[in-house]
Amino acid sequence: MKVTIMRKSYDFSKSTKNPYAKRLKKQITIRIEEDTILYFKQMADKNGVPYQSLINLYLRDCAQEHRTLEMKWS
């Protein structure tokens, strides 16, 4: 078995930045009702994923499928 010993320092001077890093995710502030957050947290626990990732997946699916919301006011 080969054992790798970590160095005290590493040279990153020749590394390059990820060109897609800015497009990965953007942090925002959004107001969501507590019962909605609880719903996603429970679903996330059942599926073993973080709830924020689950919300992102759901919203991304809506955007990719161009889903529209039908609102009817009574």
Image: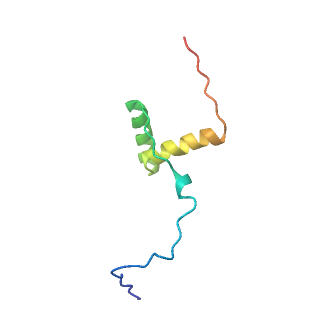
Total marks placed:
0
7 or 52: nearer the viewer: 7
Q: Residue furthest top?
A: 74
Vertical placement of residue 29 versus 17, above or below: above
In the rendered image, the vertical position of residue 11 relative to residue 19, given as above or below: below
In percent of width and height, residue 11 lies at 43, 79
Q: Is residue 9 above or below residue 45?
A: below
* Quarter residue 70 falls in: top right
Q: Residue at (51%, 73%) from the top-left corner?
A: 15
The one of 11 and 33 positioned closer to us in this rendering: 11
The image quadrant where one finds the C terminus is top right
Q: Residue at x 39, y 36 (%)?
A: 38
Task: Identify which residue, 31 or 54, lies in the foreground.
Answer: 31
For the N terminus, give its image quadrant: bottom left
Q: Residue at x 49, y 45 (%)?
A: 54
User: Furthest-left residue in view?
Assistant: 8
Q: Position of residue 58 (x, y in %)?
A: 55, 41
Find residue 28 and report its horizontal and vertical position in percent. Answer: 45, 41
Q: Specify the farthest residue to the bottom.
A: 1
Which residue is depicted at the point 47% across and 76% down? 13
In this picture the colour scheme is rainbow
